Image (spheres, grey):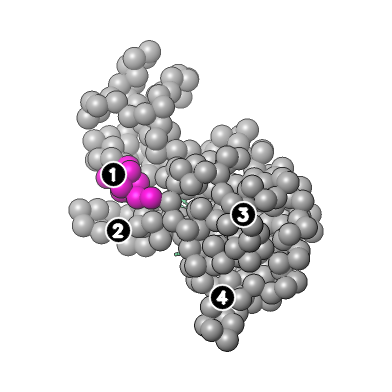
Amino acid sequence: MSGSLNAFGHIAISDELVTFLRTAQSVTVLTGAGISAESGIPTFRDSQTGLWAKYHPQELATLQAFTQNPDLVLDWYRWRRGLVARAVPNSGHLALAVMEQCVPRFTLITQNVDGLHARAGTKNILELHGSLQRMRCSAANCKFSLPDWPEETTPRCPQCGALLRPDVVWFGEALDPHVLDLAVQASRSCQVFFSIGTSGVVEPAASLPYEALRAEATIIEINPQPTPLNIYAKYSFLYPAGQVLPILAATVWPDSS
Ligand code: OAD
């Protein structure tokens, strides 16, 4: 079923969906870069602007790139941290924080490293791909991590002397197995699974909606572009998340929005 426009040209939420969500006991949400697009953070598969237009994220977000040219990779992450610091959570992030307050069991799984869900007030967040906020030691056998970035241009680990790196998952790297395990459990045990603002092409996150589907959850997708998941979604809203989510929250939970 597709989300449609009502007679006033507004996004319409069907009575059936309102009743269903009001009585839902457990909701799991997966977000991707699209949820932060309306906060001015470019999505991964958008072209980059300015200084970084000549680089692909895939060329910079790798251990190989960091090993070959740490200053270049750290400068790119500093640029992204600057964008995020100037950004504010948008109405989509805020509506998900409202949803968490209204649903008995709520888990938000995000592929984003921008921290905007936490700044919007959501509490139960699984950051699958890490966080731009933190740094950690790049040596495989060293567990040192820092909650913020130090001032130095190319900071080194105070314990072992190796370079510090952003605490994010790079292409070709494994996810934190504990975080991934919690995400799989939350996907397998929910009644409703929202997929919001993700192209659904990067594993293992891309498989989570299918885990939910196998466990007979109802899939709801919000993305202006249809993705491979679209045909499995019982409800699909082909509109920006910052437009759909506030209307959805205000219609389903009018006293909390
Ligand atoms: P992508 O850049 O692949 O996809 C962004 C999705 O957001 C697209 O499907 C857009 O159609 C959609 N979109 C754009 N604007 C939107 C809006 N206002 N509301 C809702 N949706 C919108 O980003 P991800 O799917 O997050 O991983 O990419 C997944 C992973 O690929 C990233 O976490 C990153 C990258 O490789 C790592 O760095 C490990």
Residue at the disc numbered 4: 11
User: Measured from the top left, where is residue 200 in percent x and y?
Assistant: 55, 59
Question: Foreground residue, 113 or 73?
Answer: 113
Asked if residue 206 lies left or right of residue 165, the reply is: right
Q: Which badge, 4 or 1, comes first in the chain's sequence?
A: 4
Mark 2 neighbour class, 10 Å CA radius: few under 14, some 14 to 19, many 20 or more: some
Residue at the spot 48% in from the left edge and 38% down from the top edge: 130
Asked if residue 168 lies left or right of residue 234, the reply is: left
User: Measured from the top left, where is residue 63 in percent x and y?
Assistant: 38, 37
- What kind of residue is marked 1? Gly
User: Measured from the top left, where is residue 12 in percent x and y?
Assistant: 61, 76
Secondary element under disc 1, as helix, strand or loop, is helix
Question: Foreground residue, 142 or 117?
Answer: 117
User: Measured from the top left, where is residue 56 in percent x and y?
Assistant: 32, 55
Q: Examine the structure image and report whether residue 105 is included in the region drawn in magenta.
A: no
Residue at the disc numbered 2: 48
Seen in the picture, residue 231 relative to 161 is either above or below; the reply is: below
- What kind of residue is marked 3? Ser
Instruction: Report the Cα–Cα distance between label 2 and label 1.
Output: 15 Å
Marks 1 and 4: in contact by CB < 8 Å? no
Question: Foreground residue, 240 or 6?
Answer: 6
Secondary element under disc 4, as helix, strand or loop, is strand
Stretch of the chain drawn in magenta: 79-88
Marks 4 and 2: in contact by CB < 8 Å? no
Q: Find residue 82 and name its label.
A: 1
In the image as oriented, which residue stretches furthest toward the front? 255
Residue at the disc numbered 3: 256
